[in-house]
Image (cartoon, rainbow, N blue to C red):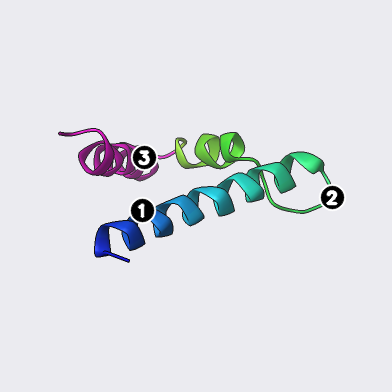
Amino acid sequence: MSSHDLTVAVYVSIGLVGLGLELAAWSGRTRIPPLGDVLGWAMRTRSGRVGVVAGWAWLGLHFFVR
């Protein structure tokens, strides 16, 4: 297994864990808030908005630039 394969496997597993957490949040049986609520909470402050934009920039630089 090359380092590229390992990196892709880690990112896929992070995505699957995130999807699982979102599904658990929407089931209503846990105290985990849905992603929309978390982002809405983060966007209330200036530092939260800067953090969200920085996160989107990091995501774009790592996945969409080529």
Q: Quadrant of residue 57?
A: top left
Give the percent coordinates (x, y) of residue 2: 27, 64
Label 2 sits on what residue type? Arg
The label nearer to you, 2 versus 3, is 2
- Identify residue for label 2: 29
Q: Quadrant of residue 3?
A: bottom left
Q: Residue furthest left?
A: 66
In this picture, which residue range is highlighted in magenta? Answer: 45-66
Q: Which mark is residue 52?
A: 3
Q: Earlier in the sequence, mark 2 or mark 3?
A: 2
- Distance (Cα) linking label 2 and label 1: 31 Å
The label nearer to you, 3 versus 1, is 1
Give the percent coordinates (x, y) of residue 26: 74, 39
Say which residue appears at 50% left-offset and 48% top-offset.
15
Mark 1 Cα-neighbour bin, 10 Å: few <14, some 14–19, many ≥20:
few
Give the percent coordinates (x, y) of residue 19: 60, 44
Judging from the image, what secondary structure is the residue with disc 3 in? helix
Label 3 sits on what residue type? Val
Judging from the image, what secondary structure is the residue with disc 1 in? helix
Nearest the eye: 49 or 27: 27
Nearest the eye: 42 or 28: 28
Label 1 sits on what residue type? Val
Can residue 49 be found in the magenta stretch?
yes
- Distance (Cα) linking label 3 and label 1: 23 Å
- Distance (Cα) linking label 2 and label 3: 27 Å
Prevalent SS, magenta region = helix
Q: Earlier in the sequence, mark 3 or mark 1?
A: 1
The label nearer to you, 2 versus 1, is 1
Mark 2 Cα-neighbour bin, 10 Å: few <14, some 14–19, many ≥20:
few
- Identify residue for label 1: 8
Task: Please state, as top left, top right, bottom left or bottom right, where the C terminus lies in the image.
Answer: top left
